[in-house]
Amino acid sequence: MSTTEVSPARPAAASGAGPSPARRTRTFEQANRRLKWGMLAPALLFVGLMIVFPLVYTLNLSLTDAFGAVNAGKGHVGLRNFTDALGDTRRFWPAARRTVLFTVGAVVLETALGLALAMLMRKTFRGMRWVRTVLIIPLLTTPVAIGILWLLILDPTNGIANHLLTGIGLPRQDFLGSVSQSLPTLMLIDVWQWTPMMTLLLLAGLTTLPAEPEEAARVDGANGWQRFRHVVLPMLGPTLATALVLRAVDALKTFDILYATKGAGGGSDFEVETLNVYAYGLTFDYQEYGLAAAVLVLFTLFIVGVVVLLRRRGGRKAA
Amino acid sequence: MSAPVTAAPVPARQRRRTARSWLRGIAIVVVTLVFALPLVWMFAAAFKTNVQVTDPSVGLWFRPTLENFRNIVEAGQIQRSMGNSLLVGVVSTVLSAVIAVPAAWAVGRFAMHRTGSLILVARIVPAISLLVPWYYLFAQMGLVGSYTVLILSQMFVSVPLIMWIMISFFAGLPVELEEAARTDGLSAFGAFWRIALPLAAPGTATASLLAFVFSWNNFMFALVFADDSTQTVPVTLFNFISYASTDWGGLMAAATLITVPVVLAAVLGQKYLVAGLTSGASKG
């Protein structure tokens, strides 16, 4: 891999960095390779070791019946854990379904709202600094604290949310106290916490767009919506695609707020148990290491699949 | 600016524009309130008595009390946990920056983008799949429950995060300066150390601040690896939910204490944090 990278035929400016790619590569080519690898090695080794060993270990574990103490004896059971997981319609498949529902719902809403907010805040206004400060606070706040704060607001009997609902004549809701409402409620909390991230990413994307195409469309008589739909949105495609992938990956892996508000197993009826929560429970509550590893392998493959799919589709749209 | 118009449409258009800008202003205010009010409600609840917390009609006008804070501080755990979080956050961030910033520079300047993108893998893999093997490994070394494990596991999040942000930051620095320095006889390392690194100070600060915040917030690693004496704040808060579920005031006071540093960081470093979040686009 290193040979292709130092080859001068590959311009370094693919990243859009320097104005003179050829000269730049040439100058830094002269630097010895030892330096380059010396500077990279600690970080790469660290991340590599922290990730390669666990992945190999997990793969190996998924083929065993490891149970109980971490270092207890274990026998190889072939693919039994995988067939067990894939045949489990009580915990595994519902968890997979919840993971998908939660992610799709949250990411779609966050993208739509994030885009709307970004367009709203696109032109500078007085107090923009403060609005941006308010926007970054939710996504920098500890998810456990966010969970607690919404537990208070949404408390079925004493929460302000029900106070306001009944105040305008709507029926009282159980929110996180209800089996059917917990997952949608947590999804909306995720939307509250992460829509600002989408907004900031898209705002950053919007500021890099050239002004001319929009100006041209305006001169040609396109109205605001048409300019947005046919000029801004296509140009924003790559940013949108990147933001979508990043948010989807994080949403799939959501754990903290689910675990903090509903506890182990995602509630009494497993109502918010996603694959991540399920794998955590198998590992640390039931010590079913073998089965947990199989679930994690399937989960990881699923995430990689989503990333590949989104990237390919996003790439095509952007092209 | 759009050329000749008759007398009548001008005021109409102007009116429409004013109306629109008013609507926009109102929309922005509403959005801000939607994101701010839940947190304001939490901060307010921290200063209420337990009777007031569970009475939604009390609202935001009440006589504040420090009772909740006094109670949780007297219990003692919260300040120990904040100390632990601070320690883990600072040490893991500094160590991560020390190895990640040079690596990011190497990726940027030697065009090793394929190597750099390996870092992305760290973002995709679910952390739980790493926890069991780490747990096994660290248990063998007798390290579970120690600060070392908390710091090492946090570095696994911080190193890719800092690299991710710094790669794009170095890409934005004019390479000419370093080239000029090389021509004047500095080594490649000298160009990094004397030229690029000082110029990258704002980026490094941004990346480190974000890494610290994500460390401060990390719940899962601490849940697995910390013991009672090394517990970090999110775990303390979580234990508090089940253990003191009726003590809303104390819960809110604890949640407020953990959130205040983040709010301070957001207010003081808004510009940098936004730049870091959008270049890194990463929550760790």
Image: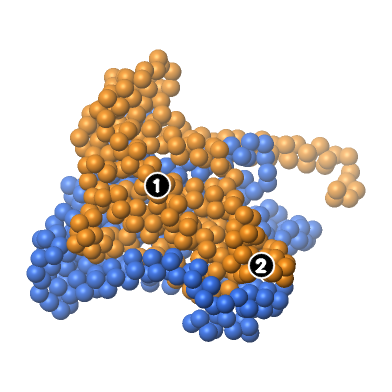
Chain colours: A blue, B orange
Q: Residue at x 29, y 54 (%)?
A: B149
Furthest residue toward front:
B185
**Residues marked 1 and 2, same chain:** yes
Q: Residue at x 88, y 46 (%)?
A: B5
Residue position marked by numbered label 2 in the rendering:
B186
Q: Secondary structure at mark 2?
A: loop
Is A257 left, or right, of B189 in this rendering?
A: left
Q: Locate residue A302, reporting x and y percent.
A: 33, 69
Q: Nearer the viewer, residue B185 or A299?
A: B185
Residue position marked by numbered label 1 in the rendering:
B89
Q: Nearer the viewer, residue B16 or A11?
A: A11
Using the image, tell me which numbered label, if any, was put on residue A161. Answer: none
Please state which amino acid type lies under the numbered disc 2. Leu
The number of discs equals 2
In the image, residue B205 sits, relative to residue B190, either above or below, namely above
Is A297 left, or right, of A169 in this rendering?
A: left
Q: Nearer the viewer, mark 1 or mark 2?
A: 2
Q: Nearer the viewer, residue B216 or A305?
A: B216
Which quadrant is the C terminus of chain A positioned in?
A: bottom right
Is B73 left, or right, of B273 in this rendering?
A: left
Q: Secondary structure at mark 1?
A: helix
Q: Locate residue A270, reporting x and y percent.
A: 20, 52
Residue A69 picture quarter: bottom left
Q: Tell me if residue B225 can be seen.
A: yes
Cα distance in 3D space between marks 1 and 2:
35 Å
Chain at numbered mark 2: B
Chain at numbered mark 1: B
Q: Nearer the viewer, residue B55 or B180?
A: B180
Q: Tell me if residue A94 can be seen.
A: no
Q: Residue at x 56, y 65 (%)?
A: B105
In the image, residue B39 sits, relative to residue A306, either above or below, namely above
